[in-house]
Image: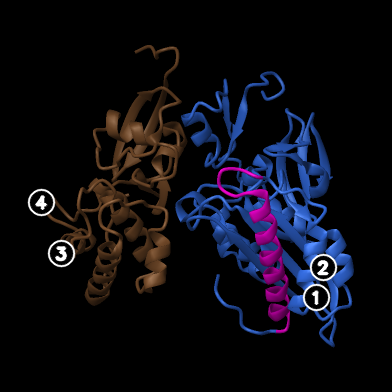
Chain colours: A blue, B brown
């Protein structure tokens, strides 16, 4: 049906598509409702990854024990998505494929190097998160394809996570969001680190040069801030009515530093302040 | 009877009653409840998922009825504010508490606030202030400043715990 009608759209949770239709920003000719395909709603361990079906509701992920223990970064970020009533309907795959620059789930997918599985032309294909996002609200998913699941790698070892975002009101769109996951060695040094920035650019990015620099360090706030500021020097943030590029750069540096320091404390078993 | 070119037949279960309807598939659940079933307690505010005034319970879970199309609601029990009173002329403990603490002024957000509170108390009979604030954080009120709404929900929670009986809803 998608291939036959390029103006047809798939509807899952509808928490973005229906507002877009209400505002006449989207005028699909047909809606293909996939809410009753039970086989697309699951959370399961799959080797060293967790696989989540595309129409799994965000509220299920929020409460899931496997997610809480295996993907603590995702568990930390989900409560920031919209509010409870939208998480009750909104799906994991819907938000990932919608590719809103300010959305939390694409940021987590980029930070953890998720892999997306989709069906097109009766074939199953896979694509990495870094190749999936190509612009604001734009992915490399073919027009007649359907996202079926996402695979998120589980990091073994002594890991910790941090997540921060800034917006005008709770549950509004973020101006800047940051996510960090670290793995520490037994003597408390950084063995592995991923730092992601969302809402500041057309799609979420990683601070790869900062990650390289911080490996082997003790992740003290000053060292982290230095590395993050340098990495952000190469980034041109978005500028709009809500937040200037200068503001976004400054806030991104602070929030990314906080996310990494939180992740380090979390890995060391120290108690974190609530967001 | 022949269906109109753009109509479809659906069945909805609202407040325990079954309804068979002929409806355009683009009709939102909100418009269907108000205009086809005469249940005016679900209020149309922003109609794009921001204000929360249209909240109903979808199998007991608070959702935006403006973001669901009526045909999508087939097979799922729906509760509106009309379905939470124990009987004609009576009020639920939550409705009582909203009256007593002045948890409403113009009343536009009130049905949704009460339904969200019902969903909260069904899940968590002993909510903290933070739990209450989190639960109503998706619902806008431009009159009360929220303080009396939080107070109302805490009062109702206290009373419901006292009666040792969960809040009743008709699904």
Q: Residues within 10 Å of mark 1 (few under 14, many from 20)?
A: some
Is residue A275 or residue B21 the one in the foreground?
A275
Q: Are marks 3 and 2 in contact (CB under 8 Å)?
A: no
Dot 2 alpha-carbon crowd within 10 angstroms: few under 14, some 14 to 19, many 20 or more: some
Q: Residue shown at 57%/54% (left/top)?
A: A58
Residue stretch rendered in magenta on the structure: A239-268
Q: Chain of mark 1?
A: A
Residue A189 sits above or below residue B149 on the image: below
In what element is the residue under mark 4? loop
Q: Are marks 3 and 1 in contact (CB under 8 Å)?
A: no
Instruction: Please tell me if label 3 and label 4 are on a single chain.
Output: yes
Magenta-drawn stretch contains B79? no
- Which of discs 3 and 1 lies nearer the camera? The answer is 1
Q: Which residue is mark 1?
A: A223
Q: Residue at x 78, y 57 (%)?
A: A232
x, y percent for residue A68:
64, 69
Mark 1 touches mark 2? (CB < 8 Å) = yes
| Residue at numbered disc 4 | B89
Residue linked to disc 2:
A227
**Is residue A36 positioned above or below B154 on the image?**
above
């Amino acid at each position: 049906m998608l291939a036959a009608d390029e103006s047809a759209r798939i509807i899952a949770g509808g928490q973005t598509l229906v507002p877009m239709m209400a505002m006449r920003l989207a005028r699909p000719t047909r809606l293909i409702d996939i809410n009753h395909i039970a086989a697309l709603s699951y959370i399961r361990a799959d080797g060293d990854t967790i696989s989540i079906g595309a129409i799994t509701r965000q509220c299920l992920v929020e409460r899931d024990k496997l997610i809480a223990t295996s993907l603590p970064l995702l568990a930390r970020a989900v409560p920031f998505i919209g509010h409870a009533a939208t998480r009750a309907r909104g799906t994991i795959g819907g938000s990932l494929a919608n590719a809103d620059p300010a959305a939390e789930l694409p940021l987590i997918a980029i930070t953890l190097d998720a892999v997306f599985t989709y069906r097109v032309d009766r074939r199953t294909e896979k694509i990495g998160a870094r190749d999936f996002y190509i612009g604001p609200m734009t992915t490399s998913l073919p027009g007649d394809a359907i996202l079926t699941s996402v695979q998120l790698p589980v990091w073994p070892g002594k890991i910790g996570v941090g997540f921060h975002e800034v917006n005008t009101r709770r549950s509004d769109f973020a101006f800047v969001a940051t996510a960090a996951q670290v793995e520490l060695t037994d003597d408390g040094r950084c063995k592995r680190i991923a730092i992601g920035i969302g809402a500041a650019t057309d799609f979420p990015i990683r601070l790869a040069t900062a990650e390289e620099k911080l490996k082997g360090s003790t992740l003290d706030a000053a060292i982290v801030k230095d590395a993050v500021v340098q990495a952000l020097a190469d980034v041109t943030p978005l500028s709009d009515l809500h937040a200037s590029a200068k503001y976004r750069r400054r806030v991104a540096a602070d929030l990314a530093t906080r996310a990494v320091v939180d992740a380090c404390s979390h890995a060391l078993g120290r108690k974190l302040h609530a967001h | 009877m022949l269906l109109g070119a753009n109509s479809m037949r659906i069945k909805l279960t609202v407040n325990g009653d079954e309804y068979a309807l002929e409806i355009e598939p683009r009709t939102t659940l909100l418009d269907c409840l108000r205009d086809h079933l005469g249940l005016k307690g679900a209020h149309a505010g922003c109609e794009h998922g921001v204000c929360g005034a249209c909240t109903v319970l979808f199998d007991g879970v608070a959702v935006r009825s403006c973001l669901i199309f009526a045909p999508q609601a087939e097979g799922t029990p729906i509760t509106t504010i009309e379905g939470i009173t124990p009987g004609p002329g009576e009020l639920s403990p939550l409705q009582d508490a909203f009256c007593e603490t002045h948890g409403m002024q113009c009343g536009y957000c009130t049905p949704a606030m009460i339904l969200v509170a019902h969903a909260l108390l069904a899940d968590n009979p002993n909510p903290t202030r933070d739990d209450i604030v989190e639960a109503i954080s998706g619902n806008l009120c431009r009159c009360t400043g929220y303080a009396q709404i939080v107070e109302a929900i805490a009062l109702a929670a206290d009373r419901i715990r006292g009666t040792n009986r969960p809040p009743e809803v008709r699904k």
